[in-house]
Amino acid sequence: MYPFSTQNGKDFQNLLSVYLDAAFFPCLREQDFWQEGWRLENENPTDPNSPLVFKGVVFNEMKGAFSDNERVYAQHLQNKLYPDHTYSVVSGGEPLAIPDLTWEQLKQFHATHYHPSNARFFTYGDLPLEQHLKQIEEEALSKFERINPNTEVPPQPHWSSPREDHVTCSPDALAPDPARQNTLCVSYLLGDITDTFEGFTLSLLSSLMISGPNSPFYKALIEPNIGTDFSSVVGYDGSTKEASFSIGLQGMAEEDTERVKQIISQTINDIIESGFEEERIDALLHKIEIQMKHQSTNFGLSLASYIASSWNHDGDPVELLQINDSVAKFKQTLKENPRFLQDKVKHYFKENTHRLTLSMSPDEVYLEKQAKAEEEKLQKKIHALSDSDKKDIYEKGLELLAAQSKTQDASCLPALKVSDIEPTIPVTPVQISTAVGVPVQYCEQPTNGLVYFRAMCSLNTLPEDLRLYVPLFCSVVTKMGCGGLDYRQQSQQMELRTGGMSVSTQVVPDSTQLDMYEQGVLLSSCLERNLPHMFHLWSDIFNNPHFDEVERLKVLVMMSAQELANGISYSGHMYAMTRAGRHLTPAGDLNETLGGMEQVKFMKRVAELSDLSQVIRTLVRIKKHLLNPDNMRCAINTTPQKMSDTAAQLESFMKDVADNRKERKPVRSNIIERPLDPSDVSGLSRKLISEHNFQPCQMKTFFQLPFPVHFISESIRTVPFSHHDYASLCILARMMTAKFLHGEIREKGGAYGGGARMGGGLFSFYSYRDPNSVQTLSAFRRGVDWAKSGQFTQQDIDEAKLSVFSAVDSPVAPADKGMGRFLSGVTDEMKQNHRERLFAVTHQSLVEVAERYLGVGQRTCGVAILGPENEAIKKDPSWIVK
């Protein structure tokens, strides 16, 4: 899929034109294949005596992708469940198979597959369709004759008896329990689900079986704490020609694998015997109903993704979009045959002989074996080379380097002009008032009748030693049970009566001073009716949570630690950036505590505790600092029709809260009050923490992890949002990314990605899935030299401005309007000032900010690298190795 979106009609035509050209008429030069695919090249391309190695963007990307054990497992599961055709191979490329692909094969593949006869087009929005069709016809379709692309996926021959298999992976240094790193899963081939209603039924059935604490498989597999989590190895997959369903568990001991197999088949029998409670089915249908009413800003794209796979296999895309028909048919069918769902379970699971049981266990020498296999492949290739071949490789390497260093002429591409951008932002009207003395922001929006409620509880009074526990508090507080409800009943009530309730940590840097910030916890929920119920649930959650349910807490801690460990190979660059900013601002320090590697390691420690009583005491202490009217503010987004009723309900909720309050004196003396609304005289304020004695310091940290690639970041302390140089630094980051860093880090360096971004008072460089380590840091430095030398054109600046404006002006959903102002105090007026400064950025101001903030003498910076063992760094005393 090649999606794009824009809010500008002219831009849409431009993009469509570029996308049609790129998809159907790409150049596909041999050099492009070497750079993006794979090549043999001297390690140092300018030194013919340096050893030959594999290079290439996709080669490194896929090596990075398979450093994630869940990805390795899911890949094996699919390949082995469909062993007889296209699904038996890795669609993105098995890293060691990539060097067998030739440029000729790539061109041949493009000619047959990237052809209108094998394409489907999807547009969404309010521009007239006829214009799109005319452009697609003229610029692409009219230049081809119909062919038979022969891309139908044949059915997978059905097995007459079940199969078992075993694979290995690399041990996970961050696993919650090092002795429990086994995964087991049973996967069922369900067959060709072209019937829309059957597909709807199966995905609903999958949710009933596995989603939430009330589901039979959650009760059978997660609650006994046999393993840590199953979210990555369960569920219905309808994206392939024939659908499949998997159920399993990760993070268990090897001796438990037999027991888990028995539990799975026993649970399937139990479901067939007893079925599902009516209330659970209602809760699930309610969830679907709310999801259909909730408006997201990428609605068009999610629709395209939703229909793509079925449509690709010749299903009916229009039928898929008529979800209400499927819901109605489902209710009717269930009424006529109450055993409808049990019959499906019996047919698709119990009586299904095409099922695969796959186990995976860690192998201490897994990474060594992989490195060895790559080395053997490399030597085999090198062995076949003559001296003149090697000379040829060296010369081609120099040619590629020269081509990568040339500035491309982009004048042939259609582009908007900066003058096409709207000079002013649309204003979002909000009303600020109070409920029992607590500030409330009301924002009337077309929300399809949904009410969105948020409460920011500031944690200024929280003692320092509790900070590390706040993310755990947020993730468990809505899942432990509360008031008269145990956690299963609570989950059921939340699904039946709301569109979800969540609690998250917030660190809001001040927009005027780098050493000021607000720390807090944000409650969010959405619902359609049942307002009093929702407020009642929130009251119970905070006044009377069941933190003493030790077994339940153990399960949640394990899942949370597992989830964090799993996320690093996807978000390594975010972890690197967070760590690099740790010693540069107080907010950066807090971000590392709440969401960085420090939090990952903390959760691993908690997961290893045999006794959680101290953790429980800590959670109870945190609770006392929350839901205190002195430290709260609320926001409501809903339709004008629902506003007054919502305000009345909120008022009585806040009365409840006020009755339960206990006076807490702030722990910190350094609290600064800021008016909520600069133009308002009501005296309502938000409280910020000011650490004016904060001393930023330089720090270089290396995290050794079992990955074959690196994630790298360098962050520099600069200026806050309201500072007049902030806009120039935003444009500089975007321009440096596109015009310099992309070429150095991806095209020459072979990393999957890299760039610079500005935010939170920090200018941050990063790279993603990068084969290099410290070399990339000098690419960052060269980026600064490039900016200081002013070797960029007005067109480069304009492109960066357009790119920054497209982010600044990206659509905001009705649910989120006014949220920037509510959370960080950034008003429309401040946004407009920032906008005007962006327009005003010049060549001179870019060179000046590069010199003023990013030059070696001027800067205070932090560096972090996540990656494989590194001897040079270990020997260098300026690095801290974790």
Image (tube, rainbow, N blue to C red):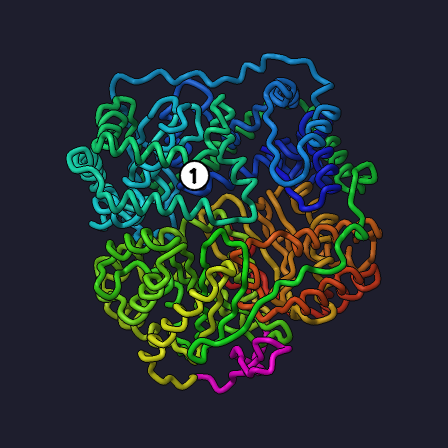
Q: Does the magenta-highlighted stretch encompass residue 497?
A: no
Which of 825 and 114 lies nearest the eye of the viewer? 825
Residue 573 position, x and y percent, is 55, 53
> Is disc 1 surrounded by few (<14), some (14 to 19) or many (20+) residues within 10 Å?
some
Residue labelled with disc 1? 71
Q: Does the magenta-highlighted stretch encompass residue 675?
A: yes
Q: Residue furthest front?
A: 641
Q: Would residue 838 be found to the left or right of residue 470 on screen?
A: right
Residue 174 position, x and y percent, is 38, 53
Q: Quadrant of residue 468?
A: bottom left
Label 1, secondary structure: give it. Answer: helix
Tell me if I can see residue 718 in this picture.
no
Tell me if I can see residue 323 in this picture.
yes
Residue 71 position, x and y percent, is 43, 39
Q: Would residue 741 be found to the left or right of residue 518 on screen?
A: right
Q: Would residue 669 be found to the left or right of residue 549 on screen?
A: right
Amino acid type, residue under disc 1 in the picture: Arg
Location of residue 34 with respect to 573 vertically, above or below = above
Residue 361 position, x and y percent, is 32, 39
The secondary structure that dominates the magenta segment is loop
Location of residue 349 with respect to 184 vertically, above or below = above
Q: Quadrant of residue 457?
A: bottom left
* Span shown in magenta: 667-696
State the quadrant of the N terminus.
top right
Residue at horizontal 37 percent and vertical 55 percent from the top: 498
Which of 563 and 608 lies nearest the eye of the viewer? 563
Residue at horizontal 56 percent and vertical 70 percent from the top: 431
Residue at horizontal 69 percent and vertical 21 percent from the top: 141
Residue at horizontal 36 percent and vertical 51 percent from the top: 562
Image label count:
1
Q: Quadrant of residue 54?
A: top right
